[in-house]
Amino acid sequence: MSLRVPRFRLLATLATAAVLATACTPGPEAGPDIVRGDHGGAGATAPDKLPSLPAPKRDLNYSNCAGRLAETYGVAQPDGIRLECATFDSPIDPAKPDGSTLSVGVVRASKAETPKDAAPLVLTTGTDLPSSRLALTLNSSAIGPLLDRHPLVLVDRRGIGESAEIDCLTRSQRSIIADDGAAGTRDVEARVTALATATRAGADLCNDTLSPNQLDFADADAAADLEQLRTRWQVDRIGLVGVGSGATVALAYQGAHPSRVGRLILDSPVGLNVAATPAAAARAAGVQNSLATFATRCSNTGCSLGADGLGMLNRVVGAGASGGLPGLSDTSVLAAITTALALGDTSPDGLGRLADAISAADRGDSGKLAALATAADGVRDSDGQLLARCNDLVGRPGLAEIPGLATSWGRDAPLTANSAALGLARCDGWGVADPAKAPETFAVSPLILLGQNDPINGLKITESLTPLMVTAGASPTTVSWDGLGYSVLSRSECAADVVAEYLGDVKLSGPAERACPA
């Protein structure tokens, strides 16, 4: 491997909302608290002042990069949004500020109308996918209300995307890990053995290449990179968005630097330091629900999945598991579909195109689905993502437990159980870093955006935030969104409008629980 561097109360209400959302039917009912851009509510108290968010005194050296990013990821540039890239150096070991550094990549998203002196909002997607890839998914009509007031600065986690690349696995190891040990068999026990063999050998290679820094890619280290950015900007505090697993980085930053967080937005979040087995179980259930929602909504529009869309999904995933789709496994089939739902067009036409790729595979023609799987692999399964996920793993189960977990979870999540359980073996032999310090208090109440149909992490895993919020005495505002896709902020104009209001100088007025229409 080469590390390419320059030098190198969520209260019970949230739990209730999450449980209800996983069982909801498509489309929320428009209740009295639904958000439609008209804020405020009965019984609102006098506004409370919040600390202001300052603009950088010393900014990074940005240059236009929309075309290069679009070519890198093989997608179109977003209309009406300017994308500019920059890098900054951060110590590899945060405890050694004068030691070797690595490069951290950022993408600034703005519009022509974005004020030049506006405070940026920092966003990270953690290990789910590169933040720079999410930048290309930003929809001007959805996120426009926010960009009219503030630019977004999307930070790639160290070792991922525009940040210094990690390349330490062999091609064979990378392929076996990405396919969860698939070799044309449904036998989970056999796949665990194949997967563990590859991961242990890969861990030895990566440890040798990265030593002594193989444990410096955890949540706490990613949070230290955000502190390095804040220090470089010479500002007292930042507004922070953590999307998906990026919420763990945002919470780690809150725990380490509570006085430096001016606003905290947790978008489709997962919890901090959640044990691996319950986290995987929640992800399996949540993603299963999202796929069922996709199948139902697609079938309702007359797409090629037909009346039994979930049945077709089960057949195609099963064909991947048994070797019936050349070049595809059940894991890569799921990655192809969930990534397309996460980042692609989820309009009826967009869902129809995805359905056509799936139905073609059901007929034996897997070309279009294989192309989607290749694109997914490029943003979901890099060496840097594996390293960081393993650094953050809490309480990995024994390999002998995994087949039983797959069987147990498969009763309610037949599409996703095997991949979720097998994923627990991907870190066998890898080092685990010390858990990040959890926040003890929140000076500013968080804003939490709940994606009811998140195809990357699902909604159920959000419940793991409840104990943390209760312990810290937080009283967040929650906004639930019933659309399909990853990151509520990037897709919902209603949610972006709430975020823009949240970034103001007074506390949010109106109900603590809200809903945005899909």
Image (cartoon, rainbow, N blue to C red):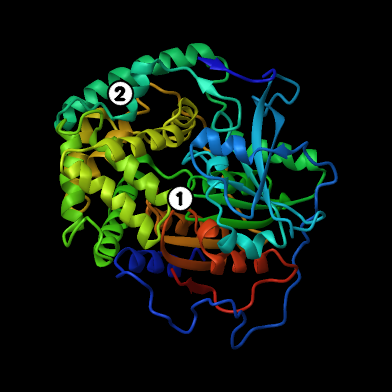
Q: What amino acid type is highlighted by mark number 2?
A: Ile
Residue 101 point in image, percent of width and height: 69, 23
- What label sits on residue 495 in the rendered view? none
The answer to whether residue 179 is left or right of residue 204 is: left
Q: In the rendering, which numbered label is found on residue 176? A: 2
Label ID, residue 270: 1
Identity, as a three-letter code, of the amino acid under mark 1: Val
* Residue beneath the point at 40% across and 64% down: 15
Front-most of 147 and 54? 147
Question: Badge 1 local density, few (<14 within 10 Å), some, or many (20+)?
Answer: many
Q: Toward the viewer: 400 or 109?
A: 109
Q: Nearer the viewer, residue 255 or 155?
A: 155
Compared across the picture, whether 41 is left or right of 319 comes to right
Disc 1 is placed on an element classified as loop
Residue 162 at x, y = what percent? 60, 32
Residue furthest to the bottom in view is: 42
Image-quadrant location for residue 362: top left
Q: Identify which residue is drawn at 60% across, 68% down.
A: 498
Q: Position of residue 391 (x, y in %)?
A: 48, 30
**First reached walking from the N terminus: tag 1 or tag 2:** 2
Q: Residue 209: x, y in percent?
A: 52, 12
* Separation (CA) of disc 1 from disc 2: 26 Å
Q: Nearer the viewer, mark 1 or mark 2?
A: 2
* Total marks in image: 2
Can residue 361 be seen in this snapshot? yes
- The residue that appears at 26% across and 58% down in the rendered structure is 295
Answer whether labels 1 and 2 touch (C-beta < 8 Å): no
**Quarter holding residue 225:** top right
Relative to 22, residue 161 above or below: above
